[in-house]
Image (cartoon, rainbow, N blue to C red):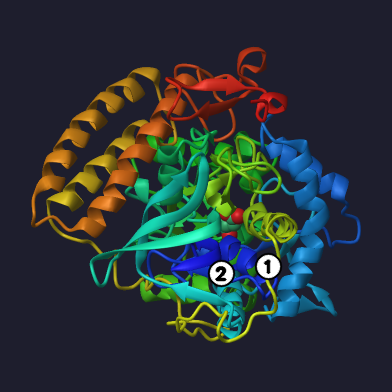
């Protein structure tokens, strides 16, 4: 099939790029699973933007840069902050039923934000945004959504990306898409860890494919853990930071409020600080969780603000209006990704990246809560604007020029929950699954919340043993090709995360090295960059990133 723009990933970034392009572009959005099963769909908190009376762009910029711990690109942050309000308004105009109070957006508060800034739809914002965007996409005859296709490799003609090969997971056949521009918007890497609140398919596919094609990747050591996921569900169900923003407190297993002695922001301290303190509190009391207590909010407020959290915990036998919730940190968000400029251009002409799979420097070493969905829409606008200017316009789309395939989905605005948290994690049995599990354990033990140089070096050696096992298994005719494409990506991305983490001999943002516990600006206020044509990890200052 031939299209103008091929987008891998049907999260908020991918769908927003598709919708922001003119209707005379033929667009394919290809999703590895069912459209709607994305990290975006699971986002609870909302979108950060400046709306509150005493807030300002300068405050939001300052909070983002402070959270980013010295590695944010100021240009990207300014773009994010200055454009977020109008992009949130765009989502509203698409039909997202944001919560409104006294005629204005109701604003939630999250960690490290000086003001209330989080625009939301109850506590299931991502699900609602995705449902709305999918419905909009369904109305466009120039956009086709293709589900259950995993990307294999980008194809290059000379050094230009001109398409991508896929494996159809249902029919078990190869498919090729040719395109004038290809956008990787495949989300994050939470599924490289055993405990994650990410969608099951978050295995860094676009990142692995871009690296194999020769694109530069940046800042992969910065994997953010969310401090408070419900420990009794599998996959991990997030207990949104907005709960703490409304006044919920954290207690250790002995009932002590431990953040008081650690950080003036208490339960709204930056995520990396909170995550490490929770891990310490769990270790100190030899317990598998700490407890989030929101009873002080009162039952009425809890149920009206957080109906999804209330319902889900109830399914597991916990009434959060009367009991505290057992929580622990879980892999949540990759701050780095495929290196892009402010238009989403990677180092390969014709290949673009957006959303969590991209790194435009906006998050630096640690993402400020709820900046990610705003980033998806703002930089989707940047990317679509660039393509509109750069790709010669066709005449108006007609039925003949439409993409010519029937969309295979329809979601209501309320949508169905993208993941059924009561059914447990879907596991594909067999030896390939055991390889995936070995990778996840290594990532948890050595590339998790805290790391050491020795641990990472040993785990890289272990990873290489697992890779040999994988190659042998892959040759066997009975091996499921679909799973092996995914595990191949998991192996590569895990290796890249470990290599970046071992190279950065300091602690910064969400990268914590026990053997180098301090931030060291003199040596390390730089981005880690890798590309397959150069050995090792190279560190570049923000100003040097695009020098060729
Ligand atoms: C949350 O609701 O706590 C998640 C928000 C985010 O990660 O941005």
Residue 472, horizontal then vertical, whole percent: 12, 40
State whether label 2 is within 8 Å of ligand 1: no
The quadrant of the picture showing ligand 1 is bottom right
Foreground pick, 290 / 276? 276
The residue carrying mark 2 is 27
Foreground pick, 473 / 398? 398
Secondary structure under tag 1 reads loop
Residue extending furthest left? Answer: 477
Above or below for 34 versus 360: below
Residue 467, horizontal then vertical, whole percent: 22, 35
* Residue 254 seen in render: no
Question: Seen in the image, is 359 located left or right of residue 214?
Answer: right
The quarter of the rendered structure image containing the N terminus is bottom left
Q: Earlier in the sequence, mark 1 or mark 2?
A: 1
The residue carrying mark 1 is 21
Given contact means CB atoms under 8 Å apart, are the residues at marks 1 and 2 in contact? Answer: yes
> Which quadrant holds residue 496?
top left
- Look at 60% across and 75% down and name the residue there: 133
* Residue 263 seen in render: yes
- Look at 77% across and 59% down and name the residue there: 84
């Amino acid at each position: 099939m031939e299209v103008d723009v091929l987008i891998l990933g049907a999260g908020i970034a991918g769908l927003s790029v598709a919708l922001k392009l003119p209707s005379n572009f033929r667009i394919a959005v290809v999703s590895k699973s069912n459209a709607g099963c994305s990290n975006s769909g699971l986002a609870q908190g909302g979108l950060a933007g400046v709306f509150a009376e005493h807030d300002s762009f300068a405050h939001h910029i300052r909070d983002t840069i402070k959270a980013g711990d010295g590695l944010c690109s100021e240009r990207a942050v300014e773009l994010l902050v200055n454009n977020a309000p109008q992009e949130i308004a765009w989502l509203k105009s698409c039909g997202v039923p944001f919560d409104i109070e006294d005629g204005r957006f109701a604003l939630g508060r999250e960690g490290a934000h000086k003001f209330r800034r989080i625009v939301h739809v109850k506590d299931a914002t991502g699900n609602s945004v995705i449902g709305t965007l999918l419905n909009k996409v369904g109305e466009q005859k120039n956009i086709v959504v293709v589900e259950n296709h995993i990307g294999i490799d980008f194809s290059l003609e000379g050094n230009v990306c001109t398409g991508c090969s896929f494996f159809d997971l249902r029919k078990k056949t190869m498919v090729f898409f040719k395109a004038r521009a290809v956008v990787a918007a495949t989300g994050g890497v939470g599924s490289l860890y055993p405990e994650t609140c990410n969608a099951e398919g978050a295995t860094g596919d676009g990142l692995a494919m871009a690296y194999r094609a020769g694109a530069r990747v940046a800042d992969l050591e910065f994997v953010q853990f969310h401090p408070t996921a419900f420990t009794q569900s599998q996959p991990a169900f997030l207990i949104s930071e907005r709960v703490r923003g409304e006044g919920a407190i954290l207690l250790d297993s002995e009932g002590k409020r431990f953040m008081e002695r650690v950080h003036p922001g208490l339960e709204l301290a930056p995520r990396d600080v909170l995550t490490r303190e929770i891990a310490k509190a769990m270790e100190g009391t030899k317990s598998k969780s700490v407890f989030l207590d929101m009873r002080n909010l009162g039952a009425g407020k809890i149920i009206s603000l957080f109906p999804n959290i209330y319902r889900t915990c109830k399914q597991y036998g916990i009434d959060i209006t009367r009991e505290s919730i057992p929580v622990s940190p879980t892999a949540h968000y990759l701050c780095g990704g495929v290196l892009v400029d402010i238009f989403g251009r990677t180092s390969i002409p014709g290949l673009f990246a957006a959303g969590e799979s991209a790194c435009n420097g906006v998050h630096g070493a640690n993402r400020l809560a709820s900046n990610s969905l705003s980033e998806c829409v703002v930089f989707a606008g940047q990317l679509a604007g660039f393509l509109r200017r750069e790709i010669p316009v066709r005449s108006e789309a007609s039925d003949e020029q439409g993409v010519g395939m029937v969309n295979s989905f329809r979601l209501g605005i309320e949508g169905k929950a993208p993941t059924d948290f009561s059914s447990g994690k879907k596991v594909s049995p067999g030896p390939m699954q055991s390889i995936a599990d070995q990778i996840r354990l290594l990532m948890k033990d050595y590339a998790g919340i805290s790391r050491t140089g020795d641990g990472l070096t040993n785990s890289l050696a272990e990873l290489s043993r697992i890779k040999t096992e994988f190659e042998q298994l892959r040759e066997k005719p009975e091996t499921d090709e679909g799973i092996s494409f995914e595990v191949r990506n998991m192996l590569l991305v895990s290796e890249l995360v470990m290599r970046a983490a071992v190279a950065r001999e300091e602690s910064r943002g969400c990268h914590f090295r026990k053997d180098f516990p301090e931030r060291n600006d003199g040596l390390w206020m730089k981005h880690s960059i890798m590309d397959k044509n150069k050995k090792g990890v190279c560190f570049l200052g923000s100003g040097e990133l695009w020098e060729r």
